[in-house]
Amino acid sequence: VNVYLDRNYTKPYGEITMKGVGAYPRLTFDRREIILPIVPLEIESRCSFRIYNDGYENLTLKHLIPNDIGNIPIRLDFPEGQNLGVTRDKIRVDAVFMSKKPISFTTEIHFKDDNNNVYPIKISGTADNCMLT
């Protein structure tokens, strides 16, 4: 970009070179996977994790737990709400699991932005029919 002084536009006083780097907004997590503690039947297993905002100005999180291995009784709680943005760069999410039948699973939770970009995180848990668990 040319720089002119005193409205003298015939000869530039100097030149400024500008460079920039752009990045697409994304979500990141505080861990690579969620591992719920092993629990006896009908006892809640709970794990908290954080989702970090990296570039979104305003985003209401949506999530989906695929039914690829059946209906897994996982619930996600958002104690701080589901909104990320300029004023909130991270939120806590509580993953809660309880089963009446013995089960062990590993699946993914898909978090989606407004453009349907998917940010997956693996989750594993076990409900065991043993009093020593």
Image (spheres, grey):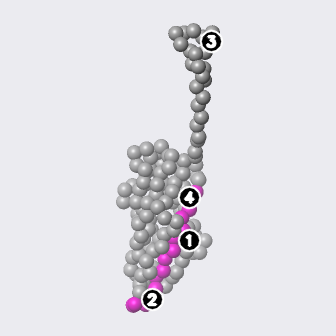
Q: What residue is shown with label 4?
A: 119
* Amino acid type for the residue under numbered disc 1: Thr
Q: What residue is shown with label 3?
A: 11
**Residue 85 pos. (x, y %):** 44, 46
Q: What residue is shown with label 2?
A: 129
**Residue 47 pos. (x, y %):** 42, 70
Q: Quadrant of the N terminus?
A: top right
First along the sequence among labels 3 and 1: 3
Mark 1, secondary structure of its residue: strand
The part of the chain drawn in magenta is 118-132
Q: Main secondary structure of the magenta part?
A: strand
First along the sequence among labels 4 and 1: 1
Q: Quadrant of the C terminus?
A: bottom left
Mark 2, secondary structure of its residue: loop
Q: What residue is shown with label 1?
A: 107
Q: In terms of depth relative to the viewer, which is nearer, 19 or 103?
A: 19
First along the sequence among labels 2 and 3: 3
- Mark 2 to mark 3 CA distance (whole Å): 84 Å
